[in-house]
Image (cartoon, grey):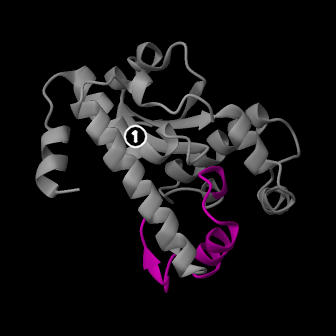
Amino acid sequence: MSAKLVSYLLSQKHAGKRLVCQLILQCSPFLKGLKPSCAITLEKKDYQKLYTLFDGTDVKYRILSERKGRFLVFFYWEKALERRLERWEARCFLREFGYREEGLKQQLARLEVRVNRYFQADRGFPHEIGVFLDYPLCDVQSFIRRKGKDCLFSGYWKVYHNPEEARSIFKTYDEARECAVREFFLGKNIQDILKKTA
């Protein structure tokens, strides 16, 4: 996608259109059902518009943190995210960070607490958020061990293992964004752009 097109999308004066453009640019793999979740930062006034945008859909969202009038918003397809977090490897990994084998609501509440602690200490994000964002567990673990350094390459996440598989996923995600942008320019709204089942 050209820088000119991205600049155009982000320069939308109408706040509702600007929000939709931000969602399309940053969340297309999620919107198209390729990922169970995503997280973006929104201004408070934009957050208040989400209900109207997603009313009547299966999209769930919650605030993980608020800083300086901006919200870190976590979007998710409930069933898909539950399936990802119920995997044995994910459960074992999350247990190391104090997550109990409870329901999704409790796990997200724990993530919210950890995100806020990290932000208050100016430490960025708790790295287990990568599991919630459906990054490969082996890459999340290597990111933690290597302190974010020495990755093979970086895209939607920092890749330490399986580079060809990651490139293929990144390509699919890019194609989802291109598709969503085309649909937006054809006049579709966010609900039309959404994959209907996830």
Quick one: quadrant of the N terminus? bottom left
Look at the image and give the residue range highlighted in magenta.
Answer: 131-158
Q: Give the secondary structure at mark 1.
A: strand
List x then y, in percent, for residue 28: 42, 43
The residue nearer to you, when weighing 82 against 40, is: 82
List x then y, in percent, for residue 189: 34, 22
Q: Is residue 109 left or right of residue 172?
A: right
The image quarter containing residue 112 is: top right
Please count the marks in the image: 1
Who's the residue at 32% across and 49% down the image?
178
Q: Is residue 99 above or below residue 14?
A: below
Asked whether residue 68 is in view, the answer is no
As for residue 196 lying within the magenta part, the answer is no
Who's the residue at 59% across and 51% down the image?
133
Residue bearing mark 1 = 41
List x then y, in percent, for residue 188: 31, 24
Q: Is residue 88 above or below residue 164?
A: above
Crowding near pointer 1: few (<14 within 10 Å), some, many (20+)?
some
Asked whether residue 57 is in view, the answer is yes
The image quarter containing residue 24 is: top left
As for residue 139 lying within the magenta part, the answer is yes
Who's the residue at 40% across and 40% down the image?
41
Who's the residue at 87% across and 58% down the image?
88
Q: Amino acid at mark 1?
A: Thr
Q: Is residue 67 left or right of residue 21?
A: right
Quick one: quadrant of the C terminus? top right
Q: Is residue 156 above or below residue 190?
A: below
Q: Is residue 148 above or below residue 108?
A: below
List x then y, in percent, for residue 167: 47, 72
The image quarter containing residue 106 is: top right
